[in-house]
Image (cartoon, helix red, strand yellow):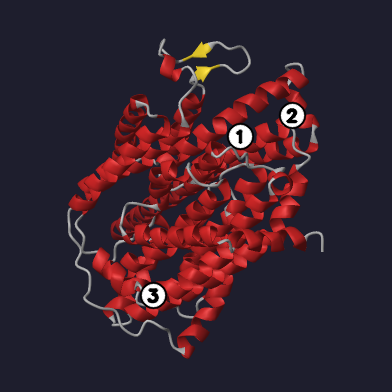
Amino acid sequence: MDFLQPVLDGFGVVLDPGNLLYCLLGVTVGMLIGVLPGLGPAATIAILLPLTYGVEPVTAIIMLAGIFYGAQYGGTITSVLLRLPGEASTVVTVFDGYQLAKQGKAGTALGIAAVGSFVGGTVAIVGLTFLAPVVAGFALDFGPPEYTALALLGILLVATISSGAKIKALIAAGFGLLLATVGRDTFTGAERFTFDNLSLADGIDFVPVAMGLFGIGEILYNLEERHRAAKAPDSVKNVWPSRAELKTSAPAIGRGSVLGFFLGILPGGGATISSLAAYAMEKRSAKDPSRFGKGAIEGVAGPETANNAAATSSFIPLLTLGIPANATMAIIFGALLVQGVTPGPDLINSDPELFWGVVNSMYIGNILLLIMAIPLIGVFVRVLRVRGAILAPITALITLLGAYTIRNSMFDVVLVVVFGAVGYLMKKFGFEPGPLVLAFVLGTLLESNLRRSLLVFEGDLFGFATRPISGTLLVLFVAVAVWPIITSARNRRRQSQRVGANSSSPATDDAGSSDASESSTQKKENV
């Protein structure tokens, strides 16, 4: 009963009219942002950060969380109707969702996605409710060495598991760590990389970095990439799936819920990896894999369930360990810090109203999404007709105004513009901004805890291996770092063996034909 009381108190927090309103606002904005290709939840949360300063921390995080998991369903609409993923996590939905739409079953695909999203999100919230206190209790044993090892592992996982080239992800993460060192040294007071600029003496604030990379950078990139204007259909009919379709999709929804929950907990996992893994699992377990890519309902149900489950479970490492699992979680982490809240093992005891208020708001938010998703499809279809050339300048103006209102500083506006250009160039040359932001957020945590640990161990790096938790985390770090090298070497060896086998076959044939020729010549001579 002692465990249930804070949970019940959390429902009292979220049922406050003001918090309910912000929850509704968050999921509605999230769905809308998911519909607009390119402008994802990370960019939206970064842009809206200044608007959260005037409200209570729990209210602000409820809204930002609603934007995150609401966007997962919104991206489904464009994937199904336009063959254009609204979110990275809905890329695989294009394969079968669009084929269903061509068969006149767009409503069925969107309906089953809504059901799967609700089930996956709800299963993940239940898991979050029971698992988060266990993780937080375990993490109370964490000291500086453990946090150092965990931050290192988190940065490496994000850089190696994220989409795109691994080398580019590692370079982006290294640049993020470098940015985290700008400002005064917290131990000695010496200035680092400030170039005698007083505005940089206190370091680079997280908000302008996030607003520039994910706001201005995404806007510029999407304006350049949006060459073809997709035409939205006039209407979508028969949205609610039939009983037979629900029965066919039920196993995929069940598997996607479990898979998405566990992959969402991992740093670098998140909704995108979960949806890809769920699609692969459904195709592999299907009796007739050839149906996939031609309109298989399981190809929509599994990934859509998994990405919503992962979006919810990624709050576990954020709230209990203070480690963001993906770029969007890093921005929410920054929002918590700006609100004066430090995520970590003590949060569940020091601020239970915020912890359980945010967790329980997801129950309400998922119900609101299920209720709104189907009736609002017509509205979102109309939104798809709005030209990007109209939306982009308005969004950029809101971003710059928001950056100025944080501290009434033009320097912050300059930072947003600079990082906007950096974000555009990164996207242009294939660098994902996610590893940079995560490394920037974790950089301060890594540096401070590493230096504290070295003070405790008197400079002996082997001290990390003497503690069970930090030693285990470092072993995992080495395994994650070495495994791609081993895999790459193994693949090269197999490839060279195949090349060698292929090249030896013609030689054998030539030798055989030569022997046959010599034998024939000998016979003629004998005759």
Q: Residue at x 45, y 15 (%)?
A: 193
Label 1 vs label 3, nearer the camera: 3
227 to the left or right of 295: left
Query: Tag 3: residue type?
Result: Leu
Q: Mark 2 points at which residue?
A: 464
Q: Residue at x 19, y 52 (%)?
A: 390
- Return the x and y of residue 299 as percentages of the image width and height: 43, 72
Q: What element carries label 1?
A: helix
Dot placed on the residue nearer the N-terminal end, 1 or 2: 1
Mark 2 neighbour density, 10 Å: few (under 14) some (14–19) many (20 or more): many
Dot placed on the residue nearer the N-terminal end, 1 or 3: 3
125 in relation to 52, above or below: below
210 in relation to 184, above or below: below
Query: Tag 1: residue type?
Result: Leu
Label 3 vs label 2, nearer the camera: 3
461 to the left or right of 367: right
Q: What element carries label 3?
A: helix
Give the distance between the C-alpha atoms of the residues marked 1 and 2, in whole angstroms.
13 Å
Q: Mark 1 points at which residue?
A: 152
Dot placed on the residue nearer the N-terminal end, 3 or 2: 3
Give the distance between the C-alpha atoms of the residues marked 3 and 2, in whole angstroms.
50 Å
Q: Residue at x 44, y 77 (%)?
A: 112
Toward the bottom, the furthest residue is: 243
In the picture, which quadrant includes the C terminus?
Answer: bottom left
Q: Please say whether residue 269 is visible from this viewpoint.
A: no
Query: Tag 2: residue type?
Result: Phe
476 in relation to 282, above or below: above
Q: Mark 3 points at which residue?
A: 110
Closer-to-camera residue (393/234): 393
- Return the x and y of residue 96 as percentages of the image width and height: 37, 72
Closer-to-camera residue (500/324): 324
